[in-house]
Image (tube, grey):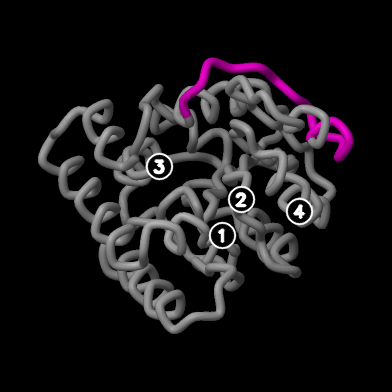
Amino acid sequence: MVKATLEQTLSIVLPTLNAAQCLGPTLAACAEAGAELVVADGGSRDRTAEVAIAAGARLIRSPPGRGVQLAAGAAAARGAWLLFLHADTRPAPGWAAAARAFMAEPANAGRAAHFAFALDDPSPQARRLERRVAWRCRVLGLPYGDQGLLLSRALYEQVGGYRPLPLMEDVDLVRRLGRRRLAALPVAATTSAERWRREGWRRRSARNLLCLSLWFLGVPPGLIRRVYG
């Protein structure tokens, strides 16, 4: 069993690749916690590095690939607790208090937490998708990376951390954690709906479901990456 840590320090790790447009608002939302910010960049050619440094984040360079970047960011982070966030995922105001409350409970040193899923789109399609994701998390215990993941470093290391996968690195990690060790924080994190708007709500959702199904069928992540687009 993982022992509770006495030092409740938090590091927030964000993988980036040409994320200059969305990274600023995410880092601004993260500032609420006063935590260490670690941006693991996979070779951006835009202003991502400039935005990260201006926000006071530590910028580290990594080979591209979200799993590789997340692992590199975790290795560079100094906190006893780690919060992994996507660059286009902004936790709602009040998230830091919810995270601190979770971290302060000794039993939670052996558990991980995620945010509720929300999209920056006012459409009925967005609300339906949010409800489906809530069901998936509640019943199947499968939060995705765009919901963030908060866990102690001890637990992260115990389960083996992020693997260098080109896709499905989030599902891979939460499956190793197991449904019983996952909890939902009482606050949402808002993710960009641009991909759904661009590709179509049904088409994008169907593609995501196909990728998940292929993962459970044992298809290599490199091949699933081609389907994901």
Q: Is residue 58 magenta?
A: yes
Location of residue 52 by image quarter = top right
Mark 3 vs mark 1: in front: 1
Residue furthest to the bottom in view is: 124
Identify the magenta region: 52-65
Residue that carries the numbered disc 3 in the rendered image:
170
Residue 96 placed where, x, y %?
Answer: 73, 60
Query: SS of the residue at dot 4?
Result: helix
The three-letter amino acid code for the residue at tag 4 is Pro
Query: SS of the residue at dot 1?
Result: strand
Quarter of the image for the C terminus: give it: top left
Q: Quick check: 78 left or right of 228?
A: right
Q: In whole angstroms, how far apart are the C-alphas of marks 1 and 4?
A: 11 Å
Location of residue 86 by image quarter = top right
Earlier along the polypeptide chain: callout 1 or callout 2? 2
Residue that carries the numbered disc 2 in the rendered image:
88
Residue that carries the numbered disc 4 in the rendered image:
25
Q: In whole angstroms, how far apart are the C-alphas of marks 1 and 2?
A: 6 Å
The three-letter amino acid code for the residue at tag 2 is Asp
Residue 100 placed where, x, y %?
Answer: 71, 58
Q: Which numbered disc covers residue 191?
A: 1
Earlier along the polypeptide chain: callout 2 or callout 4? 4
